[in-house]
Amino acid sequence: MDYRAQLAMRMLMNKKGSLIGAVLAVSIGILVIHVNFVIFQGLYDAIVRDMKAYRFGDVYVTNEDDYIDKSDIALVNWFERIPYVEAATPRLDSSAGINATKFGKRHEEFRVPVVGVDPFRDIQASTIHTTVGDGQFVFSRNSIVLGSTVARDLGGLQVGDNVELKFVDRSGQDQIKRFIVSGITTSAGGQGFDFSVIVHIDTLRSILDRTGETGAIIVKLNDPSKATEVKDLFLRSFPSDDFKAETIEESAESALRGFRSGIALINLIGYFGMTSSAFAIVTIQMMIVSSKTREIGVMRAIGAKRKDILLLFVFQGIIIGAIGAAAGTALGLVYTAHAKETRLEFEGSLALEVTYNWTKIVQTALTSFALAMAASIYPAYRATKLQPIEAMRTV
Amino acid sequence: MNKIYGESETAVHAIRDASFSVKKGELLLIVGSSGSGKSTLLNMIGLLDRPTNGKVLIDGTDTTNLKDGDLSSFRNSKLGFVFQFSNLLSDLTVLENVLLPRKIQQSYDTAMDDATKLLRTVGLEKEIHKRANKISGGQAQRVAIARALINKPSIVLADEPTGNLDSINAETIVQLMKSMAEKLGQAFIIVTHERDQFGKVDRVITIKDGRAFEGEEPKRMEVTA
């Protein structure tokens, strides 16, 4: 081993307090980045996961101008012939005024979004049915699933209660329909239909006078990476039908744009933190240079060049960077594994979607290592400036 | 050589018109009272400080215009240093301290053999793996002597080598240096204010008020090269 590297290691090992301090500075910097990633990227990915699972699927098909008037069964069958497609289902959206009478008290009408689903296909293409905590999913034409917030605002409605919805059909006429509550839905993080109600799609079509029309087709893939391919194939196959098809990224773009900016800012703050740890290394190494002033003078006296002294302290930076990066990455991976295994969530919010981004993990470790090495350059430079005679006079 | 600190009215002449030579194998003592300029002179000979005017020639090489890197290399190969406080590197073992000048030179061929031989000569072959801060002052000074000789320098410069030792250890160091000078043929230039410790030596130069005088008593000296 190069004698300078050997001496650098010895100096650090004999100053364990300084070494531990410097390594901690580097590793905590890395750990902060990992924790940020797990929490914020995990939250983002969880929102995308739930939006995909409940609302948009992997491919979301609508009509550019109006409702889809092609047969929904035909479209679903077309999609389900593609090997990458696991299932497809139609949806129809509307809104209505809702009111209910509970314990003799009538709760004032307020507007709610209404989602019409095909209960048999929907359970294959989405997981919204899993959010029904009380009761069961829509199963008949007069059953309704209430979002938990809607149920609460209607005076705490329960399964078996009645509600009345008032729609405006396509000709502007009010249409009133009574439903029996079959289930109450609650989703972690509110990405489901907590603020909406769910009815049978055929019931909604009938009320709105839109028989044979569909609002959207949701497509679930068994290989999500093929979303763009499936989307493009669909659009090529129906060139004159004014269809609009989007992947989840495109569907959720407006909802997620702000979140992405927030994540970028959080990451920036994390990297600032890592830069701060570099200053800690500068301070610690300056202390080591100061405590080794006399020995630096002796080395120069017996023939070491300025370059040798510079390399000595740069090697220290390399050692600190390497140990710190390894320790920080290990801690970060432990935290990530813990978050993944325990499906980490905060105060009942949605469970984070935790993944290992190996590119980011390696990049973080290398950046931290490079910063530690860079942080050693100034102390190393100061060490080279020491004149042998003056240095040896240091007590 | 002259060494002047400061300028005009505040100038201090640390060394005035000092000029002498030393031969291989010679043991030269530089004596003088505290503050007379002995260490300043030694630092200039050892290329750790530059004279204000004058030059230092070692083995025929004029060191005046050597750059910092070349000076370092020259010190490493031509000079050996023994300091008052031994100045061993505490993070290294006895053996590693002795090997250090050779490692700086990046010449490893016979390094281990040379180092162990020298440590045997100074009587420390059993301590080679001890950390430098775990040995006594006298032992440390012997290690320093071995370190000074590892690269077979032309001159060994010792600045108050016994200044920090008790009389017994001091005597040991003096005898060691004398025998090394005789056996190995290096020139030894030793600065001391304890003249009596060294007994009979080849030459003595006395420094008084920055001037160098041949011999023990300050008398008008013919300056010789």
Image (cartoon, coloured by chain):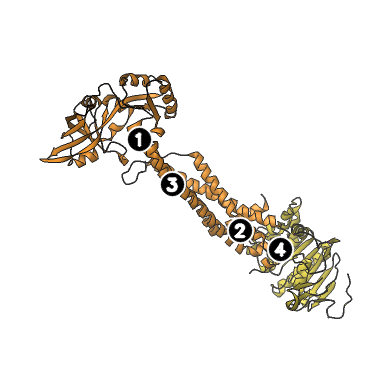
Chain colours: A orange, B yellow
- Residue B96 visible somewhere in the drawing: yes
The quadrant in which residue A295 appears is bottom right
- Residue A103 visible somewhere in the drawing: no
Q: Earlier in the sequence, mark 2 or mark 3?
A: 3
Q: Are marks 4 and 1 on the same chain?
A: no
Residue underneath mark 3: A36
Q: Quadrant of the C terminus of chain A?
A: bottom right
Task: State the residue in front, A95 or B36.
Answer: A95
User: Are circles 4 and 1 on residues that touch, CB within 8 Å?
Assistant: no
Which of the chains bears the disc numbered 2?
A
Which-is-in-front pick, marks 4 and 1?
Answer: 1
Residue B61 position in % (x across, y down): 84, 60
Separation (CA) of disc 2 from disc 4:
30 Å
Per the rendering, the mark at residue B143 is 4
Separation (CA) of disc 4 from disc 1:
75 Å
Magenta region includes residue B66: yes
Residue underneath mark 1: A51
Magenta region includes residue A39: no
Which-is-in-front pick, marks 1 and 3?
Answer: 1
Q: Is residue A31 left or right of residue A183?
A: right
